[in-house]
Image (cartoon, coloured by chain):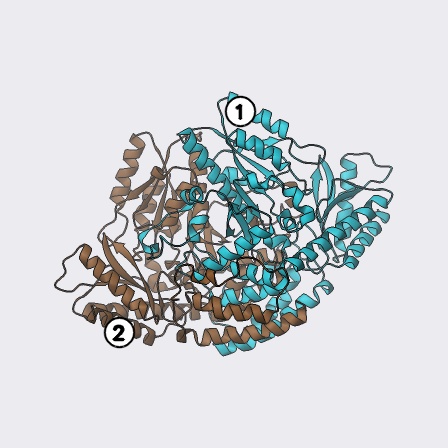
Chain colours: A cyan, B brown
Amino acid sequence: MTPDEFRAHAHELVDWMADYLAQAGNRPITSTAAPGDIRARLPAVPPDVGEPFSAIFRDFEQLIVPGMTHWNHPGWFAYFPANSSPPSILAEMLTATMGAQCMSWNTSPAATELEQVVMDWLRQLSGLPDTFTGVIQDTASTATLVAIISARERARARAGTSDAQLTLYASGESHSSIAKAVRLAGLGAGALRVVPVDDVFALQPAALRAMIEADRAAGMVPACVVATVGTTSSTAVDPLPAIGEIARRNDLWFHVDAAYAGSAALLPECRHHFAGLEQADSYVFNPHKWLMTNFDCTAYYVRDVPLLLRACSISPEYLRTAHDAQVVNFRDWGIQLGRRFRALKLWFVLRSYGADGLRAMLRKHIEYAVTFRAMVEREPGFEVMAPSPFGLVCFRHHPAHLADGAELDRHNERLLARINASRRVYLTHTTLAGRYAIRMAIGQWQTSAEDVTTAWDLVREAAAAA
Amino acid sequence: MTPDEFRAHAHELVDWMADYLAQAGNRPITSTAAPGDIRARLPAVPPDVGEPFSAIFRDFEQLIVPGMTHWNHPGWFAYFPANSSPPSILAEMLTATMGAQCMSWNTSPAATELEQVVMDWLRQLSGLPDTFTGVIQDTASTATLVAIISARERARARAGTSDAQLTLYASGESHSSIAKAVRLAGLGAGALRVVPVDDVFALQPAALRAMIEADRAAGMVPACVVATVGTTSSTAVDPLPAIGEIARRNDLWFHVDAAYAGSAALLPECRHHFAGLEQADSYVFNPHKWLMTNFDCTAYYVRDVPLLLRACSISPEYLRTAHDAQVVNFRDWGIQLGRRFRALKLWFVLRSYGADGLRAMLRKHIEYAVTFRAMVEREPGFEVMAPSPFGLVCFRHHPAHLADGAELDRHNERLLARINASRRVYLTHTTLAGRYAIRMAIGQWQTSAEDVTTAWDLVREAAAAA
């Protein structure tokens, strides 16, 4: 494909892309494909001879698009949002075209320095003190693994041995990536202590303190505590000030996971949820969730850069450059050597919307959540299941004839299936204190008040038909 | 930015992108920016109010592009190639627009099933038996970490304790990501045994066998050996059949790293370098290097899928779906939960070029390397430093008045700086058996025979001026 053939095809694609964005809501949000359906329609062997782009694009439209789950549909209320946005997509087009490998300053000076600039912009917008330095990671999973490994290395160094039995602490509401990181880091599944939560699903500091003391008395080496601002199930907020204080007194690494809710730190009225964050050793949040920036783009902040480098840097001869002593080589700040030019999309987004534009979008979603919650609370037979400090409302249908228990859970499971069968909205579920809960996560950039009302209408219709 | 504003800007960008591809060779390949130059020209604080796209794009052109290292310039002979290509860029445009999160089958059925299909296509093209199953990872660093963690888990399970002192083996020419993975996996820096290489930089099986025996006699638990097809410094090929046999007899995990050279397995005439690969437990190579597919796209193949799942899977309630028992959830096949729709670009590339088109491209680069090597060999005062089985030629200038040693190294360092100062080509260096070597890595998709001749002319001119 020559550059001019590319030009023609890319112009065609741009029209498809703009239409996709404009008409996202007209498409069924989920696919009806059964497992194996799509694979069965694709050839089992690769082609020997190249095919014209028209044939490839036709298959994309006919086989792939109908088999997709449309995360950028305005009826997206599932999981958490994974926003793309027009300026972010424009940046991805340029990033893909240049195809630069941003592992070292030398392999793309502008990419490294732009990353430093936008990560500092984001630090300022998040109200983090300038004792924090940021780096873009691909995902929160990876950033969390880096945090756990950093905690492990610090604890082992302080214990003076790698045989110390380390213990780590997080609430049962913390994200699965934390338990996974503890396992990947080789600390053993039992090393992660599950700290109980209170009735609003926030970690109980007194329980944390008691567990640390018991572990220490038993000869363990408490190494790390992870607090969450905005848990995945219910967006609960762990009490950072108390946890930070316990971490400090006990010499624990203090990691704060705000993968979803971190974007809300841009709002002064939400800033109180992040009080105590300045005590953290490391902090992660995902602009690719709720800040208009295409996946993948995770912001990872640390206070102790030299320690991060000790954990992650390695410099073979073939990567050494004349500038190494004067520059930042972000390959030494995470797991991967190879790095995409992710700073560009964050820069395009921050400049296109400005802080005010991003705040307006966040406020809109939070306001929708307040409205939706009020509708649930007003409706007989429904109940909310947790506080809603951000854009998520957890609720269930609770008809009078059903008591708490397995049957009520199955009732809501069926209800959710019925809502999603409309293929106009998509919601997911969780369990809270053992009870099945439907999650309504509001945060897709094209979602309007009308989309929220539609979802609520579908919920009520499904309940009425039950 | 509305979808229609996006449409207008994206069309402008497409013309810029097509021009960038068409005129890649007219641009200086590297930047003259000094550390801090670019950062100094960017505002230290983020904008409050959104800016028009024209202002953002102007800054992109004026501040960012001149500060980039242009990896897709036809004069790219540095590191290894990181090819973008027109069909791959087209796919990236669609991937960015849909912004789907491909963690589970359910969160995008077509993405999961297309990944299964293209990874099987690539398996067939690489001559791997169907006992291997593939998954796309972001980078070889991550895939290697998964392999090392898998080896660790298997060895610990077999030893019946997590206290066993594991040892791992790779040659001193193996990639830095292996030493890094051993450290990240928490095995301690000393756990990686550096196996000596022979005079063509390939791992010595006899030495490997002796080291394993000595470690076992000392109470260690040998757990893993990593062999490389196409090392980073010189593209040396470790003897897979002998290493695989040693791994089998000693119950070691056998990981094969062909990050760069794996693409050459598509060529029947190169297949002999991969003999013995069928004994591997895991295999990694990067279509994003030499197979026209945009970074990031790493192919990771394993034989024991259940073991991979034991190492990497974790399923909290909020991720469970009705289909979990019937489908593949690729989130359980690696480090990250979140996953981009990377299969799309690989599909576009494999179909656009076909196997024959990709083979023609690979053959062209290898032929250029043969030609370049012959020119070096013919030229008095130059010497090649290693065999060139693929697209890389390692060489140095060796004037008669300089003996082997530090001065000759510095001479070649200066020579390389002079070549690169042309900003028409970009080459990098390594050390081989302690000697400074210039690396000429041929593999950029737009590189022509003329570009190779230009590079050689620049080398000779620089040597003449020395």
Picture quadrant where residue A76 is located: bottom right
x%, y% of residue A224?
52, 34
Q: Chain of mark 1?
A: A
Q: Which residue is mark 1?
A: A215
Nearer the observer, B107 or B55? B55
Nearer the observer, A362 or A67? A362
Q: Secondary structure at mark 2?
A: helix
x%, y% of residue A46?
49, 64
**As shown in the figure, which amino acid type bears the numbered disc 1?**
Asp
Q: Chain of mark 2?
A: B
- Vertical comparison of A111 with A129: above or below: below
Residue sitting at x 59%, y 24%? A210
Picture quadrant where residue B150 is located: top left
Label placed on residue B457: 2
> How many numbered badges does the structure rendering display?
2
**As shown in the figure, which amino acid type bears the numbered disc 2?**
Asp
